[in-house]
Image (tube, coloured by chain):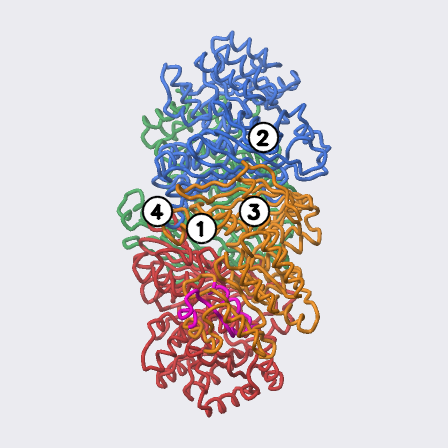
Chain colours: A green, B blue, C orange, D red
Amino acid sequence: MERALSWGLIGGGAESQIGDAHRLAVRLDGLYRFAAGALDIDPERGKAFARDLGISEDRAYGTWQEMLEREAARPDPVDLVTVATPNATHFEISRAFLERGFHVLCEKPLTTTPQEAEALAALAAAENRILAVNFGYSGYAMVRQARAMVRSGALGRVRLVVAEFAHASHGDAADADNPRVRWRYDPKQAGVSSVLADAGIHALHLASYVTGQSVASVSADFVSCVAGRELEDDAMLLLRFDGGAVGRLWTSAVAIGQVHGLNIRVFGETGGLRWDQEAPNQLRWTPLGAPTRILERGGEGLAPEAQRASRITVGHPEGLVGAFGNLYRDLHDAIAAARKDGTSPWLAGLPLADAGVETLRVVHAAAESARKAGRWVKLSA
Amino acid sequence: MERALSWGLIGGGAESQIGDAHRLAVRLDGLYRFAAGALDIDPERGKAFARDLGISEDRAYGTWQEMLEREAARPDPVDLVTVATPNATHFEISRAFLERGFHVLCEKPLTTTPQEAEALAALAAAENRILAVNFGYSGYAMVRQARAMVRSGALGRVRLVVAEFAHASHGDAADADNPRVRWRYDPKQAGVSSVLADAGIHALHLASYVTGQSVASVSADFVSCVAGRELEDDAMLLLRFDGGAVGRLWTSAVAIGQVHGLNIRVFGETGGLRWDQEAPNQLRWTPLGAPTRILERGGEGLAPEAQRASRITVGHPEGLVGAFGNLYRDLHDAIAAARKDGTSPWLAGLPLADAGVETLRVVHAAAESARKAGRWVKLSA
Amino acid sequence: MERALSWGLIGGGAESQIGDAHRLAVRLDGLYRFAAGALDIDPERGKAFARDLGISEDRAYGTWQEMLEREAARPDPVDLVTVATPNATHFEISRAFLERGFHVLCEKPLTTTPQEAEALAALAAAENRILAVNFGYSGYAMVRQARAMVRSGALGRVRLVVAEFAHASHGDAADADNPRVRWRYDPKQAGVSSVLADAGIHALHLASYVTGQSVASVSADFVSCVAGRELEDDAMLLLRFDGGAVGRLWTSAVAIGQVHGLNIRVFGETGGLRWDQEAPNQLRWTPLGAPTRILERGGEGLAPEAQRASRITVGHPEGLVGAFGNLYRDLHDAIAAARKDGTSPWLAGLPLADAGVETLRVVHAAAESARKAGRWVKLSA
Amino acid sequence: MERALSWGLIGGGAESQIGDAHRLAVRLDGLYRFAAGALDIDPERGKAFARDLGISEDRAYGTWQEMLEREAARPDPVDLVTVATPNATHFEISRAFLERGFHVLCEKPLTTTPQEAEALAALAAAENRILAVNFGYSGYAMVRQARAMVRSGALGRVRLVVAEFAHASHGDAADADNPRVRWRYDPKQAGVSSVLADAGIHALHLASYVTGQSVASVSADFVSCVAGRELEDDAMLLLRFDGGAVGRLWTSAVAIGQVHGLNIRVFGETGGLRWDQEAPNQLRWTPLGAPTRILERGGEGLAPEAQRASRITVGHPEGLVGAFGNLYRDLHDAIAAARKDGTSPWLAGLPLADAGVETLRVVHAAAESARKAGRWVKLSA
């Protein structure tokens, strides 16, 4: 297919959940061929899984280094590489691929430190490559509608943004010793933050994505509700944005009763919005002094960004795979435009390296604030 | 890819909504290559669209007849043909492909008369081919959970099933003369029924699919709310099922305020269930004398049928494309098993020819009842 | 208190649920003194309970006949009598009190036959007394808002009304022999209908109350889901209204999983409304082609009828007692106006004798239709 | 009526919303006679209004001082006095009535400083009088169910409580100069806090009421979203409770799109609860690893505290008046028991002086923290 780009995946092996989500999203619109992969830390297992997934023998790689060398040497290397490896490896892998001229979509968090993220962002700019970060919830049509409405002034100046990503995945104390859970709360393995860096970072990104404002300072409260955890399993962030908005952001891994728990509310001078990831096809909009309206994905009168992010008719739910797919679609168009020395108008709607940098700065500033009993920490741009 | 089957599509051209939904669903799991198509009544437009979609030149056909002849002559014909043409052509096309040994997934309604549907069902049986009907909502994981719960006896004997598919698509009288709407209410073009045959038939199918019971008799009330419509834009069906359940089924195209409007409630001796297509990842279950529980797709303790129909983690919505995709996945496994002279355990969960026959019998019996002021009409098996 | 009227209650003894609801509603606004009562079929128990409730010794009556004679003989008889006795006694008691010049609020159903209801209506008219029927859900502010919106033309011509009152109170087959349940399904005790006459009648009333149309003909399907019941525990009514609207009305006593289950949806040419008794402070309104709006009791811009029916600020729920209280408030104003030979503008919003007559005619016509396999039955005015 | 107590009201004049809510609640159960009142700062207006409400001439007082003197001198003084005057006067009036032996229900906040509140609490204890504070939301049946479930250990140890009271009442900047709004943000009139002391204090109370834990330390962020406001119109509190729970509490007056906005979520080791004031008849309970259950007021299996707080059958909503009424009912029983030198078992479920003290301490500590950029402030017991 002429328009199809070729895609490579690093990580996302047979045990990984996120690998599957990427592959579902990549396939959805038929805009990519899944051409190459280094899918597992165990080379043989990775190669076998790649072949199971239909990758040709010669592009089923044992390591990312092998993939890098051999793809770079091909006349038809992959057009886009997705990095879905453990967080600590994002920096090295993304850097290596960017340096060799690949466009990269990296899982969040982009790196483990803001400095690394800044270096990657600078590298991507220098190489004129796209470096995107998989803040996949920003792909939902009604998130994009919210962003468009804020930008168009439908809410007036934004005063306040209240975001949550509070789930129950680590709420069972009996899991505390489960190795799949334990490493997340060990600073040696997980860095300065656990639930904020893993889940809350999405709410953080959405807050900036929707309002168009960056965090200027933060005060944070980290707690470990389950005994024996060094890192936080619950956190509250107080925020000030550079455009004047105030933020309140709660994230938790012990909120028993919440299924997923990502939502965002934006309050402006002349209206408010509410969006919940578990009912992603609706956006609640309340103009000042008027009844709340329920806007529907696929409905009439939505912004072009939201219409583009919609595939099927109103009333038929689209879900997370569609949202991830929208990122891949935007990347497809941006890469195709870049090939022709052009720029896609949809590039601006993608979570790019700067989003990766900003969110990491906030996570690290929040961790610093939490260590200092909530002292406000300014973010240096 | 070894496991991938090859797929062909008839109809579903550039203007069609349903064609897109099929292609999204087919791509989702990577279980098929989209290998051949006759996509449009206009041969050149259809070929061009097929090529746009990545079909090779030689399998982008101008007519379904051409596709039939040439695919049948190939050593590697498509493994599955989807028929997404106007309703009146379903019979002829499906028959032709079944006769030449193809497995077929046909859009609903399977045909325009029960007699045609019976003939197709007999043909499929004689040829030992799969003939499935795209009652796509039956692919939702929580519909399958509901079915599994009924079968397991969680509700006791089913007393009552209440289903709705009531939307607002034709609620604007100003659209009455719009040709895209008008034909639907013209018996010469649409047959004996409009909204029941088009929308209500899904609710009808779900009622049987979930309860495991077939309609034994029906009384119907058809009305045309918008002036000038010969066929019904609103209908109510009273039902008796062969397993003793009573049914109430409302369908409408003028229900302004309802976005999609498909839902089903099942009431048994020892419990009740409720599922809504607009929130498809939840199933409400109330055991007799106990509080209502909200079961979540991807959650713990679901039936194998529901687990299989789930792709991503709990709390991340899946939507209609996933549901359609589940039909394609089941078909994939059934076709693969058939190749090996075996039977897939998942075949039983697919809406097959008998579902197409039964729903058409009910639609026609309902139309007869409506003509006779609601007289009860028995369904001959 | 000058403005307070005096109130008397017949029935509603210590075991009765409805008696309590009346007393709560009567007290709520301080518009009545509870002055007299004949509360129980057992005279001594009734007198004792009346005294417990603060009724003076001389007005705690043993029988309604005694109450009638003695109140009629007083210089200060009660201003309003509520009849909350078993259904079969409504006619006789209401007639007796109307004949002696009392205003009466009678529980629903007004009588056991339409003929009796007509006689009472004629009597009330002849005596120039108010005879109201406790269709208490019509007292909810947002029901009144719905009625006002229909009347103002906000929906255009009403095409369709879909109403439900389907609960689970008699869903447990183990209760079938419970005397408190059994009599309800015995035609000798309960008359021609069970769940329709008891619960569905409220949905029937709301349909007319909100649309302003009367039922012109009906087709009905009655079923007994629980073995051993002679009368229906589930019914579906198909309706034609005199203003051209079509109706679908489902009522059930075996809908396990529904808590209360009363709701109404009205669909017109230019908009739709939805109201649910379990969330009574909201009314969903969808103008044709526009997003659904959530109107809130106490919010801005509501009709005067809705504002009057609201006591506390928006966002603070009001419940059933408030709705019943609104009927008592309207009665208070109507009685006060009648004393001055005037008419209260709020009288029109009360469910009066004609509502009692109409609903009984429909119940009886439905029962007749059900006996005749759903044949349509016309209502003679 | 033997069991009826006599009640007096101070404040709550014709313009007051809260006065009406008290009178509705007092009347609801018929447990009090409204016997005396000093309802307005303007003596004549207050007396006239009292007479309109049915108070006898001699107990319609011009001032609270007059009421105090004359009631205290009567052989049959009021049994309970409700203080619903402006906040700054609560202390003086409550003190005066307590000193003369009256039981008092005071509107929240109990006083303007914790010291005053402590003095009142000490006085009430010394005089052996009941001093309750109108944290009226604690009267909802399902709040009491939540409290009972926490106490019974249904959630295990409480780890986390997340509460909100965020509305939109002062979201319109055009109202900033409206005198009815402006005073609330003027520290000279409103004290150290605006929206926290007015609205958030309810969420604060519920957090302690439900968990049974007191706040041990607080960090707060106060902001004024609308220009020109000295006091906060939005606040976030981080909390530590004495039983080990962590709290996050958000309150706002500028949250456009929220109607009322009070809710509470409690997360323990083995389960979670969620309750929303706008749907007060439901409580969502999720046991660890199991589906969420929806508990209904009036349903089976609830705790005695919740059953007692329920008046009508399940599925019929009760609202705020019922909740306030439950406080008055508990007060009635406590006062009746006190007359007999006994103690009511329901006294413990009332928000008493200690709740008034604690909430004020937290408000003041929060204000101090907010002034110090969120420094944690410990609460001295």
The answer to whether the residues at label 2 and label 4 have Cβ atoms under 8 Å apart is no
Q: Which residues are magenta?
A: C19-47
* Helix, strand or loop status at disc 2: helix
SS assignment at label 1: helix
Residue A221: image x %, image y %?
Answer: 40, 59
Give the quadrant of residue D209: bottom left
Crowd class of label 3 (few under 14; some 14 to 19; many from 20; radius 10 Å)? many
Distance, label 2 to label 4, CA atoms, is: 37 Å
Specify the amino acid type for callout 3: His
Q: Are marks 1 and 4 on the same chain?
A: yes
Query: Dot 1 surroundings within 10 Å: few (below 14), some, or many (20 or more)?
Result: many
- Which is more foreground, mark 2 or mark 3? 3
Please indicate whether residue D118 sits to the left or right of residue B62 in the image. left
Amino acid, disc 2: Ser
**Which residue corresponds to mark 4?**
C174
Depth check, front residue: A111 or A174: A174
**Is C101 situated above or below C218?**
below
**Dot 2 and dot 4 within a common chain:** no
Q: Label 4: state its secondary structure.
A: helix
Residue closest to the eye, C348 or C297: C348
> Which kind of residue does numbered mark 1 sit on?
Arg
Q: Is residue B25 magenta?
A: no
Q: Quadrant of residue B173?
A: top right
Q: Residues within 10 Å of mark 4 (few under 14, many from 20)?
A: few
Same chain shared by disc 3 and disc 4: yes
- Disc 2 sits on a residue from what chain? B
